[in-house]
Image (spheres, helix red, strand yellow):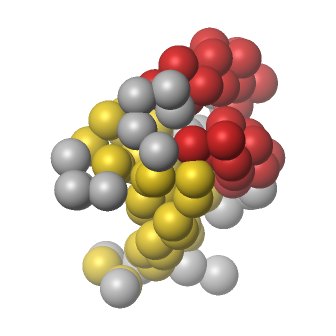
Amino acid sequence: MDKLGQIYEQIRVHANELADKVGELIHEGNVRRIIIKDERGHTFMEIPLTVATVGVILAPILAAVGAIATVVSKFDIVVERDTP
């Protein structure tokens, strides 16, 4: 799905893969926002990313992601990217 120069991608992961996948997405350069939803579509967390804040917020975000992974077994990650 494209919206005003943005590309949206949806990825389905299990709880044990959630923190690793979010960390991997944060390290990519073209991700603007990550939205974590449960299997019913309810938003658990929305993470806006900018290049300046990635290093500062990485550890707390991954800790929070690990904590919510204990609640639900499957998640959808919606990734908003800049168009190339």
Q: Is residue 69 visible?
A: yes
- Residue 39, given in percent of the width and then of the height, sits at 31, 56
Q: Nearer the viewer, residue 47 or 10?
A: 10
Q: Is residue 26 visible?
A: no
Residue at image coords 46%, 71%: 10
Describe residue 20's horizontal placement relative to residue 84 as left or right. right
Dividing the picture into quarters, in which one does residue 57 lie?
top right
Quadrant assignment for the N terminus: bottom left
Describe residue 25's horizontal placement relative to residue 80 as left or right. right
In the rendered image of this protein, does residue 27 appear above or below residue 59?
below
Residue furthest out toward the front: 73
Residue at image coords 75%, 43%: 20
Residue at image coords 41%, 46%: 36
In the rendered image of this protein, does residue 77 appear above or below residue 72?
below
- Residue 69, given in percent of the width and then of the height, sits at 52, 32
Dividing the picture into quarters, in which one does residue 54 lie?
top right
Quadrant assignment for the C terminus: bottom right
- Residue 56, given in percent of the width and then of the height, sits at 70, 17
Say how many tags the image has: 0
- Residue 60, given in percent of the width and then of the height, sits at 62, 14
In the rendered image of this protein, does residue 84 appear above or below residue 26?
below
Residue at image coords 33%, 48%: 38
